Image: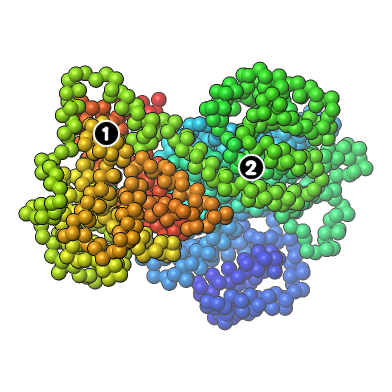
Amino acid sequence: MDPQLSHYTQFFIVVTNLCKTNQITPEQKSLLKSNLTSKDEKICRMLIQNSGPGKEIQLREALLDYLAAQNKQIQRRRSHKSKTVHFMKDVAEQETQQEIVPQQESSAQPLASAAAVMIEQLVGVLHKHIDKHSLLVSEDKEKLIQLCNLIQKLTSEQVDLDGVSPFRARYSSENSKLAEISEKDLDSSDEDVYEKMVKGIDHIYKELKSIFTGNLHTHLLLMQEDISYENLYQVLKFLLKTLVDADEFTFFIHRDKEWEVYSSSNDSIKDVTPEEAQRVTDELAYIRPFCIHRIDPKQRQYPQIEETCKTNTFSQTSIVKFQLQLKNYEVLFCLHWTDKDKKNIKRKFINYANMYGFNKDVTHLAQFLVETIITAKVQFFNPLRFSDQVQDIGISFMRISRFLLVEGIKKVLSIKFEVEKEQTFSTDENIKRQKESQCVKIELKDQNPVTLRIKDMDLKNEQDLHLYSAIIQIQEKYDGYVKLCYEKSAFYKYFLRTTDSLLFDFNKQGELIFLSRPISKSLKERFNINFDPKAILYNKISYQDIFAQNSIISNIEVNIQNIHENRRNQYLSNLENPQFEIFLKVVDNDFKGFTVIFHENEARRLKQYFMALKIDNMTNDVQKEAEANKSLEEDIQKQILIQYNKHQTFKFLNQLDETQDVANSMIALFIPENELQQIRHRKTDGRSPEQQSKDLQNDQWVAPPQKKKKIGSSVYIKYQQQLETVDANLFKVNDSDSQLDLFEFNILVLDSSQEKHRLVYSILERNGFISQYKLNKQCLAQFLSVLQKKYNKRNNSFHNYDHGIAVMQSAHYMLQCGKAKQQIDDFRRMSTIISGLCHDVSHTGRTNIFMINSRSKLATRYHDSSPLEQHHAATTIFMLKDPSLNFLNSLSKEQSQQFRRILIDNILYTDIKVHFTLLKDFESRIKDEVTKPFGTGDDDLKLLTGMIIHTADFNGGAKVFEISRIWSERVNKEFSAQYDEEGRLGIPQTPFLKDLDKLHIMAKSEMGFFKVIVRPLWFTLNTFFDGYLQQSITNLDNTIISWEKIYHANLPKEEKQQQQL
Ligand SMILES: [Zn+2]
């Protein structure tokens, strides 16, 4: 009656769960395990009878019955104090342990080795079967992995600080710690020891307090006008150093079937070869999620992971595995420390994480870092977006730091006393009472309460009493500080969300601790404010550094003088200059600091908020406090959510064109007004007569010879000889046309133009428009033949008929989504799909700027305002005026008018110049849902279909990289040709179009363009469509990263060196 592998697996899972949920004690768990190892007949039978999927409950009941029957035996064993066994380590350390702890119970050892042998076998089986060619059914595989995780847990969770097994530590730590101390304090007397202990604890207290200030410094660093990626990257590294003292990080990320590795030391993403990826996957199977593991370089447990992260170059590496909330990507995150300085107490966040259950908080920090890096790599962002999260992480580390204080107290006390730590309260009341009567206790109440029992401390002894009360005092002070941090955080968060007030918070020494957002240029100028956030890295920043204007400084100083006299909170409106106000904080008669607030029209509301703030009410328990703050916070959030969202967008736009990254890239082309004027300005300034004559020629640039207008002539008849005939009889729907309903549809694989025409027809037919609006097939055929002709007459590599159909198909795809159908009626859907088809007809292959600078006819005709787009719309309407082309001839007069309006609006929205306005308007409408549901606003549908066409215009870029790259190459070919032509014509050469034939320059330009323009569009629409366009986001992220890799791989050596300097 031998149990098989699957039985063992199930047994381990059930037993571990029983123990985890406190239904059995660790001793009982050990007993069950050892009885299984010795093949106890009852257990074996139980296992076999209750095996299989869904039988866990029966097995659990059976095991509990079994234990009940053996109750007496257990009682006896419990007194033995045998604990969970540390399998793997025990085997490895058997010999050393025997030397160190000769008193170790003899019974534990055979059990440990037997279990170890069994586990080794299981691991062997898993190794053999877990790879791709696995013969295991997935259920077994899953169980095996679960089992491995359990084993992993058993071997890792008990690794105490400094990697010492508690098993050994329990017996040796007191001795070794005493030895350590006695070495240091060889000559010191008892009094010195007490004094040292108090000092030591006070030191820990102060160091832990610095977590919150450090976190606020991180926030200050974020408050720069420079929103470049590089700045954010520095901020993240600073945050990591501040919170856990780590120097670098690496993460493995599993997306779209591929593994990639990001390394912070050179801020780059690398692909992992399939073989390496397989090994990483295998190694990951043994890592328990959310559990912080320390990598032991001697054991080489994870050879591939260690090699990829180059762990040998660091003194310590800890890892954690998790799923990314953002996208369900699997991530392995590695933290690295370069030196061995173990004195820094913040490192212990990592060491104690599993033990105290704050591995979730540490994982959250890791998740934030990963998400921020991958988001910032693919999309431009507003730093305010991250401020909130930085605040949250800071406050959560502040809370859990109380455990470090308790650990610190324990360590310091063990110089003289025997200290026992207890995390969960013992269920055995007798033992508890017995222990309590003998010991002095220090308690930390939290979700995971901790009690320190100090054995030989005698409170009748004056020194002991003094030490004890000092500790209790520090603990209370620390709790108060944590509460204060919660309060401050809520206060700061409020200001993070206001739109027109700017808050500076100073401590009582007058040093800046918080700034609510980057200071606008106008405010800086008006009040003569100097502020460089980076200075915080080297110095404290005082109010005198910031305000050069004497009136502000004297205002502050006079008021601080006053407050020392009357000692109460004061809110001071400034009558001479109502644009800033000062709030002075007093807690318990003690001046605590002051804030300076600049604002435009929020004065009254802010004042009320201040009045309501109960700064000196700090009697509650931390938990309660946090909850109270939460509700307060929710309140505030509701109040100003809408404003806040609007603010984000505006701020983003304002900052965008001040950013160097943007100013020097092609994107500047799309933020035109000022840029455009500069270019025009340059042109009129230094124009030679030669150029002027060239300019005259330029005027004729657009005029093709056949364009001499004959009023009343039929477009179709005029072109007929040159046109290919489109046979309306071919307009049928094929079975294969279902590809038209997919996001992946790729026009590039088609070369027959008959087939392309037919697909246009098919899209209309699939929507039912042909019959619903009685579209005229014959006219449609002729319309398409003229449309194609007009699209392709200049042989544009990008702006051609293919592009028109691709945009039409993409719009069709989007309009199939439920939310689109629910918002947009059939007629508007049809009009929008046709807008997509025609949106670039008769494109010159040049940008609007070129059209304007070259003084083209189009620019003249449309007064430089969206000349191309107006031309595309006008061309379409002109064509439809021709009776032989007007396939919409069954529409009523009103419908025709409406169609015309929708078509024009949609096409005008494809001018990149209005991109930001459109995006901003749409964003603020969809975020405004609370007060005014989308669809009820006058322009909502116009905005929505505008967004659809504008976004669909970038469908090529949103395809998988292999296809996206082709579209990018095509459009860049047009840009390069334009740059050359600008040179030939002697008109200003658009700087961002220079050298696009060089791969690294094109790659950089594409990267920026996708991050700033394309991704935000798809992202916003995807949000509105509840994830319907998720594929595009995945593709775009991949595309941006791919361009980044191409950029780095093709960067000429000289430039690479320059960058490193
Ligand atoms: Zn287009």
Which residue lies at the image location 36% right of the left edge and 30% below the top edge? 675
Give, as a three-letter code, the residue at label 1: Ile
Residue at 50%, 39% (x, y): give it. Answer: 650
Residue 789 placed where, x, y %? 15, 51
Which quadrant would residue 423 be assigned to in this image? Answer: bottom right
Mark 2 and ligand 1: say if the CB distance to the nearest ligand atom is below 8 Å.
no
Residue position marked by numbered label 1 in the rendering: 852
Left or right relative to 488: residue 147 = left
Asked whether, in this view, residue 890 is left or right of residue 393, the answer is left
Q: Nearer the viewer, residue 602 or 75?
A: 602
Task: Report the amino acid beneath label 2.
Answer: Lys
**Of 805 and 1027, which appears nearest the observer?**
805
The N terminus - image quarter:
bottom right
Image quadrant in which you'd find residue 853:
top left
Tell me, for residue 493, which label it has, or none.
2
Disc 1: residue Cβ within 8 A of ligand 1's nearest atom: no
